[in-house]
Image (cartoon, rainbow, N blue to C red):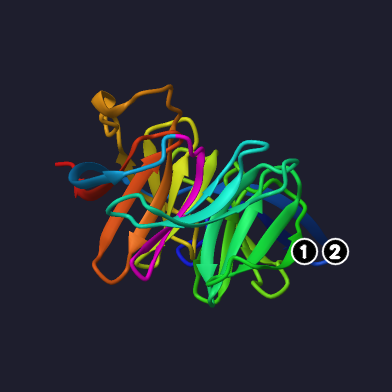
Amino acid sequence: MNTDSLSVGRKSIQIELKTTHESKLAQLQVVLKAAHPPIEYTYKIINSFPHDDKSYTQGLEFFNGIMYEGSGQYGESTLRRYKLETGQLLQSYNLPNNVFGEGIVIFNNKIYQLTWQSHIAYEYDLETFKLIRTFEFNTEGWGITKYNDLLVMSDGSNTLYFLNPETFTEVRRLEVYNHIGPVTYLNELENINGKIYANIYQTDDIVIINPENGVVEGKINFKNLLNKKKVKKEVDVLNGIAYDVAKNRMFVTGKYWPEIYQVEIIAQK
């Protein structure tokens, strides 16, 4: 059985056995994993920029020279934009106190922002931050990005949900596996050159996922990225990926981190 064209994950195979006098059906459950281990990457810091260390970073997006950020925590969740170079706040919107803000993405001049366990997504006008409408969804909201003409959402499992941006309804879902098994705790997402980069919650790792078949093609270890000399208060985990399409720059940060880092990833030998 050639599985090269199939996505990874759980599959159901139906087997039909025919004899001269009868026909019988049986079903077999199998799990397809990645054929090869992911490429291991390390990183090089190219530059660093100020970051609000009071922001519990959930989503990061760079668009037209401006950084956009969604932050979490009940009573503290915001959507904001600011100048990358200085950290100067340009605009901010406070979410209701009873929701926990999560990932953000910009798509077709709109901003979409998830909530953690409220099953609500917000759609804003890009320029004014005016709330246009809300959507309901059935799982938890963690990270969100775009792929072609769809949105892609994570919920902390090993599943990515591909959504219609006009209705927020599910078009398809994709399981994510490496060569060992399912890769869970997929969190903040970013589309970089057609691949989905995902923070693995509570780790220093970002994985690179093929959005067509769910294979983890790479893993970047960002251990010791945070400059602890700049830390003035307790910080939390690595979280937040943004990409500057125009200048091919990748940015990463973390929850309550005092800096955003422009990084170059380097394959380990």
* Position of residue 241 measured from the top left corner of the image (x, y, whole percent): 40, 50
Callouts 1 and 2 close, C-beta under 8 Å: yes
Q: Residue at x 61, y 44 (%)?
A: 77
Q: How many marks?
A: 2
The local crowd at label 2, few if under 14, some if 14 to 19, many if 20 or more residues have their Cα within 10 Å, is: few
Q: Nearer the viewer, residue 98 or 266?
A: 98
- The circle drawn on residue 19 is 1
- Residue 158, magenta (yes or no): no
What kind of residue is marked 1?
A: Thr
Residue occupying image coordinates x 66% and y 66%: 123
Vertical arrangement, residue 113 with respect to residue 52, above or below: below
Region rendered in magenta: 54-68
Assign the magenta stretch its main secondary structure. Answer: strand
Helix, strand, or loop for circle 2? loop
Q: Amino acid at mark 2?
A: Glu
Where residue 100 appears, as percent x and y from the top left, is 66, 42
Residue 210 visible, this orientation: yes
On whether residue 63 falls in the magenta region, the answer is: yes
Question: As drawn, is 238 to the left or to the right of 71?
Answer: left
